[in-house]
Each structure stands twice: as C-alpha cells, then as structure tokens.
Image (cartoon, rainbow, N blue to C red):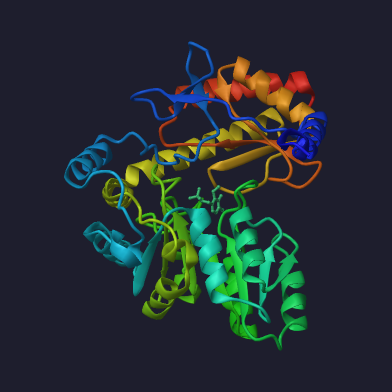
Amino acid sequence: MNAMSALTWMEEELASLEEASLKRSLRESYTVPGSPGRMFRGTGSRSLLNLSANDYLGLSQHPAIIEAMREALLEEGLGAGASRLVTGNRKAYAKLEEAIAEWQNCEAALVFGSGYMANAGVIRSVVGRGDVVFSDQLNHASIVDGILMSRAELVRYRHLDMEHLEAMLHKHRDKRRKLIVTDAVFSMDGDQARLHELKLLKHEYGAMLMVDEAHSGGIYGRHGEGLCHELGVKDEVDIHIGTFSKAFGAYGAYVCGSRTLIDYLVNKARPLIYSTAMPPALLAGIAQALALVQQDHWRRERLGSAVRFFRSSLKKSGFLIPTGDSAIVPIIIGDNETALRFSAALEENGIAAVAIRPPSVPEGTARIRFSLSAAHTDKELRDAAARIRQVGLQFGVLGR
Ligand code: PMP
C-alpha cells in the first residue's frame, strides 16, 4: 500500500464533513493597527467589526504591553530554551506568579503555556483511575480532554442541573477522590455556573471544586479577579484557573490555589514538566497586561455598557438570546448550513461573526456566537445591531 492510499480514509471523512457543512478550514485574518475591535479578512479591502474575538478588554494592541515585550525580547531573546524544571525558569516567572497570587488573594499561583494545557494538565494531575469527575455537559473541550487523559470516571451532569449533579454525587459518594469542575461563564452560551450551589454540594459530598474562569477572568470582580470573587465563593474553590488569552489580550494561563496545590502541580503537571517554558517576552507582556487589567476599571465599565446595549438591541429586534450579562451572546440558528450562510451574510455586511458548529456545540444548535469588546464603539455596535436585525429578517430566524 502506498502512502496515498493509506490516507484515503481521511479524504472520505473530510468529504463527509463537507457534505454535512462541518468541514473547517483556516482563513487568514489581519489586525487593523490601532483598532483591536476590527479586523481584515481575506482579500477584502474594508475592515470588519470583529464580533468573534475574545479580546474582551481591548488590550491586544496596548502600547505598554508591546513596549514591555520589546524590552524583554531585546534583553532575553525569544525562546526560553528548556522546560521550567530544567533551565527555562527565567526570573519573570516568579515575579508574575507573585503578582497573580497577590491579585487573586491566594497562597500561590502557577503559569501555564495556555488554558488548554492548564485544564488538561491540572485535571490529569489531581485525579486518576478509581476517581470520579463531575463535569457540566457544556464544559470546554480542554476540561473534557483532561478528564479523559486522567482515566478517572467522567460523569457529565446536565447543563446547570444541580439536582442531576447531586444525584450523581450521591451515587458515587464512596469513590476515592471526587472533583466537580465547571466553566464559570460557558464559552458557547455565555451563561454562568451556579457557583453558590456548587460550593454547597462540594462540602456536602467532600469533593474538590475546580472553576475555569477563561471567559470571566479580567471581567468580573473589582479588579478583574473573576466571577468567583464577585460572587464571594473564591475561598471555596480549590483550583481556580484562568487564561491570559482572552481579557488579557495575550496568551498563556494561570492556576491559583494553596501552596500545596501549586507544589503538587510543579511535580505532577505534565504540560509544565514536559513542555518548554514560555518565551520571556510573553511573560513580560502578560505582567503588563495584568497591571492594566487591575487598574483600568473603565475597560470593564465600557465592556459592561457595550454588553447591555448589544444584548438589549438583539432582544428588541426579536432574537431569543440566553439571559445573562456576559460578553458572549449567541443566536441559535440550528442547522449547520444555514449558520454558515448567516455568517457569510454578516460578513457581507461588515461583521466578522463566525458560525459555531458541532462538535463545538451540541448537534442541531449551530449558532452565531457574538463576543464583545471594550474596544467596540457605540456607533459600531449600533450599526452592527441594525445589520444583524436585517440579516435575521432575511433568514427568518427572529423569534425562534
Ligand atoms: N477554557 C475555556 C472555557 C475556553 O473557552 C478556552 C478557550 N477557547 C480555554 C479554556 C482554553 O484557553 P486557551 O485559549 O488559553 O488555550
């Protein structure tokens, strides 16, 4: 058999993805210097309003971050050259981790290469064969992958259904270690975990609680500490995770908790042990972004008013959107092909808002997921809301 024929099955699978409007391909996008809320796409000469990015606070092009990175790059070069436990643990790590722990008011923090690595690495470290993980059905894929890699039993409870979770906790009450894990704000629906109830269940059943603040870190809490702080449950969360890839406009992730947890992860978390340390310039950029996230309250306020305006405009137009106050606002279209055409129609109207399809969301719930940024202006959002309404009318999806 030659190499070509050995891969025929892939061609067949790709063809069936295409058939079901589920094939993905990489499209180029370009930044618009000075306008983090906009982007160029393909060969188009006019910029689009970017309603699909997670640069929630509009920090991705901040001059102070770029300058901090430039200085570190000149001083330290690009790559760290080795993993942290070998020789890659540059001094910027300790400084950043101390700043994160202070910001989060926790004993210790640990930086990971990405949110995906943090979720996968942490879960695999804290549970294993004979343990059980209770995971909201709509948790992010990196959480699910971490559980699968851990070989612990995966129990998916219905989305936000605390009765179902309690029944499952009861059923598995005699298991060795139990971990409840949830997104704080769900990435595809923009709704929130029931953190108060999770806190009570965790205590009742002697489970650990892990919360992923990917879409809430930087946004909720007085200094952007996250939803757990805002709701006053932070001290009940054993493992607190957030990313630098969204509100911080950067890349990387943090884990916060007790000194014991962090020491344990340094010994057990495979993405930390077996992957090269982060580029020092990136650590410098993140440190600067963290300072801005804490100081720039106006960015959270601006995002908040953009969210309120956008959500109420879509509702007034007749779209059915989930309740909440997060910066993620989905409109459910249903079938994959229509969602793709809807997205293309938005692009013709100057709006970048991609169609999200299975397996990222459940079958039959393909959607346009809008995400807002403090960088979007009132005028941009007013125009966008009017155009989205027009496209909604054209596709007959209002009121559905
Ligand atoms: N958790 C959630 C809830 C996410 O939405 C994402 C990003 N899509 C991640 C984790 C992964 O974070 P990162 O992009 O930093 O790998």
Residue that extends furthest to the bottom in the rendered view of this protein: 174
- Nearest the eye: 193 or 399: 193
Is residue 83 left or right of 133 when viewed as pictured? Answer: left
- Nearest the eye: 210 or 387: 210
Q: Quadrant of residue 120?
A: bottom right
Residue that extends furthest to the top in the rendered view of this protein: 45
- Could you tell me how many numbered marks the image carries? 0
Relative to 273, is 325 above or below? above
Is residue 92 left or right of 375 when viewed as pictured? Answer: left
Relative to 340, is 230 above or below? below
Q: Position of residue 196 (x, y in %)?
A: 58, 70
Is residue 342 left or right of 386 when viewed as pictured? Answer: right
Q: Residue at x 36, y 78 (%)?
A: 259
- Nearest the eye: 10 or 277: 10
Relative to 194, is 249 above or below? above
Question: Which quarter of the rendered picture does the C terminus lie within?
Answer: top right
Query: Is residue 140 visible to us here?
Result: no
Q: Residue at x 28, y 44 (%)?
A: 78
Question: Which quarter of the rendered picture does the N terminus lie within?
Answer: top right
Is residue 232 left or right of 205 when viewed as pictured? Answer: left
